[in-house]
Image (cartoon, rainbow, N blue to C red):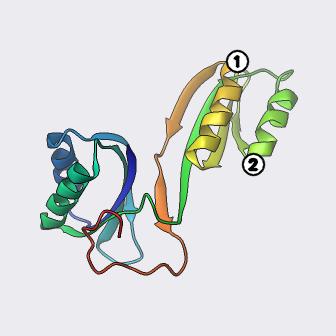
Amino acid sequence: MKRIITATVRNRSGVLNRVTSLLQRRQFNIESISVGRTETEGMSKMTFVVDVEDYQKLEQVTKQLNKQIDVIKVSDISEKAIVARELALIKIVSNSQLRTEIQGIIDPFRASIIDVSKESLSIQVTGKPEKIEALIELLKPYGIKELARTGVTALVRGQQPVSSDSSSILG
């Protein structure tokens, strides 16, 4: 089962390596990871999309992550109301005759062309992973030369109660 786990951590050298090593030792497959600074100086937020066998293994790894010295808070936000987005940059084969056709494909996705050359177009799209996947599928027939994705980043929506037990998997 896929889960979205967030971890607030101290922004220090080696923290990402220690956290991902712990997940790897527990044989979690990390499908995506995004990390960036938060509104608090010296803190970062990690967002992982992981594939896990069952709730018991998830609870075990959540508790172990919370024991890490630089980890402040760990939450499984999979079953909460969240806002989740991803960014993708897609370079496709294109020529001047195809540009209008491609523009017609990307417009409904609110994607934009960010670079143009004689042989290619680079497109930027943000949204839910399913939206990104759908656009990629539509662009495949044109020939994808290069693809870069950030991975999911997410926030819990609005005024949801915050659990005092940050290791709770359904909190």
Question: Is disc 2 placed on a helix, strand or loop?
Answer: loop
Which of 16 and 138 lies nearest the eye of the viewer? 138
Residue found at x 16% / y 49%: 22
Distance (Cα) linking label 2 and label 1:
20 Å
Q: Which residue is mark 1?
A: 141
Q: Earlier in the sequence, mark 2 or mark 1?
A: 2
Residue 170: give its label.
none
Q: Is residue 4 left or right of residue 169?
A: right
Looking at the rendering, which quadrant does residue 115 occupy? top right
Q: Secondary structure at mark 1?
A: helix
The reply to whether residue 169 is in sight is yes
Q: Give the residue number, with chain letter if any, for mark 2.
A: 110
* Image spot of residue 4 (x, y percent): 40, 54
Q: Nearer the viewer, residue 169 or 104?
A: 169
Residue 17 percent location from the top left of the image: 19, 49
Q: Amino acid at mark 1?
A: Pro
Q: Is 113 left or right of 165, judged from the image as shown?
A: right
**Residue 44 on image: x %, y %:** 33, 66
For the N terminus, the quadrant is top left
Q: Is residue 33 visible?
A: no
Residue 163, quarter of picture: bottom left
When the figure is inspected, residue 138 is found, relative to residue 25, above or below; the finding is above
Q: Is residue 22 above or below residue 169?
A: above
Question: Which of the pair 54/16 is nearer the observer?
Answer: 54
At 55% from the left edge and 77% from the top edge, which residue is drawn? 158
**Quarter of the view holding residue 9:** bottom left
Q: Nearer the viewer, residue 37 or 27?
A: 27
Residue at point 30%, 71% (across, down):
43
* In-image side of 160 versus 64 (left or right): right
Locate the C terminus by quadrant: bottom left
Q: Amino acid at mark 2?
A: Arg
